Image (tube, rainbow, N blue to C red):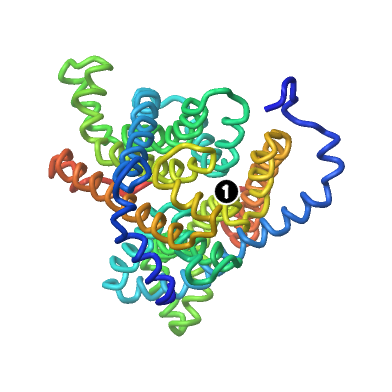
Amino acid sequence: MSFAAFGLVWGWLTDPANWTGVEGIPARVLQHLGYSGLALGVSALIALPVGLYTGHTRRGSLMVVSLANAARALPTLGLLVLAVLLSASELVPVLVPLVALAVPPILVNADAGVRQVDPDVRDAAFGMGMTGWTVLWRAEAPVALPLILLGLRTAAIQVVATATIAAYVGVGGLGRYIVDGLDNRDYARVGGGSLLVVALAVLVQLVFVLAERAAVPAGVRARAPSST
Amino acid sequence: MAEGEPLIRWDWLARNAARIWALLAEHVELALVPVLLGLVVAVPLGVACTRWRWLYPPALTATTVAYALPAIALFGLFLGVFGLAKPTVVVPLTLYSLSVLLPAVVDGMRSVPDPVRQAATAMGYGASRRLVQVELPIAAPVVVAGLRVATVSNISLVSVGALIGIGGLGELFTDGFQRAFPTPIVVGIAAILLLAFAADLLLVVAGRVLTPWSRGRSSR
């Protein structure tokens, strides 16, 4: 960024007026986190059980792979505007694309995580007398935890990004600064909003990485395969 | 949206075919150039990372961080550097492509079995000839897999550029939304999905053509 542009953005970021009120930065951050958290929660609720199931029963691998590939190609902006145009309310149509784009990473990684569990672990669990559901819950899922959490982290990044774009269709959040700034040719606002989104994305990443460190036992972490 | 508005008006599609083709061409350019640029950077960088292992962790971290940043935010930041021009979209997408292609090149290079490298050296191949004629061809399938992911992702991400007016087929989304007219949006989504599917298929075929030895073995 040129010095002049950076100066303008810095001016915008340090202006106290931008930190107060309904359109202030803290309010927008909370909105953004609110939408993102809600979408992530709903996606996890849908995707985790399905992914754990297909991984454990080793069924549906074709569906999982197709889902992964299709999800990569779906254009976020297109889904958002179509959903809003086709419905009457404001929140629900935005949630649908947010959830639709977050489900695949969670599902695919949960499936892969459970599938990649060492067969000896499954054998031992069955040998100890555990039945299917218990094997999944007490033996496979803990070993699959690194990949499950990676899927959640990937989905979180996707959701934060989509929620930013969702400002185009009228919702709040940090994307508002970018979209409104572009409308008004206020490029200081665009730059400031972009920097804030970047900071938020990095923070979300950090939170998930720390959660992974905290939740995954050292022994499991040492054997963890790398990302999907 | 207007009452009884159908999801897709075929007459609109017919009348605007020329414009859609132009947008498609722009879309292809905006999606492919970053992949090619990413490849041009990833191959030498990846080879260097296999040769000097300490290079890989910082390089990987840098590109992974870039990958986690929302595209729209990167477009917004690079607006301050390039203004409302194509590089504002191409540079961030190149960073995204790089974050996929660098691990692909490194993993591909690492998949070359050591005995094969040693045999080549024993046969008198110099380091650069060995790289080009032995190691890179063996690494090719992994790199092609990375190219597929990068290309499909880019084709989808280019449409976000419509928010700054440089979005190829994405302009159909902003156009349709501003006029409360779903036809361009549906056409845009379908076109992008078809484009992604076609590009993926082309890359699979290209991969098969580049590795004739893998086909030979499976036909036995």
Q: Which residue is mark 1?
A: B156
Left or right of A44 on screen, residue B31: right
Residue B106 visible here: yes
Give the structural element (helix, strand or loop) at label 1. Answer: helix
Question: A115 or A52: which is nearer to us?
Answer: A52
Mark 1: which amino acid?
Ser
Q: Residue at x 23, y 46 (%)?
A: A207
Please state the horizontal and vertical placement of residue A78, each as a whole percent of the image: 60, 40
Q: Quadrant of the N terminus of chain A?
A: bottom left
Please state the horizontal and vertical placement of residue A64, each as a whole percent of the image: 47, 32
Q: Residue at x 31, y 62 (%)?
A: B61
Question: A111 or B206: which is nearer to us?
Answer: A111
Above or below: residue B183 compared with residue A222: above
Q: How many neighbours does mark 1 have within 10 angstroms: few (below 14), some (14-19), or many (20 or more)?
A: many
Above or below: residue B201 compared with residue A87: below
Residue B138 visible here: no
Left or right of A98 on screen, residue A143: left
Question: A74 or A141: which is nearer to us?
Answer: A74
Chain under label 1? B
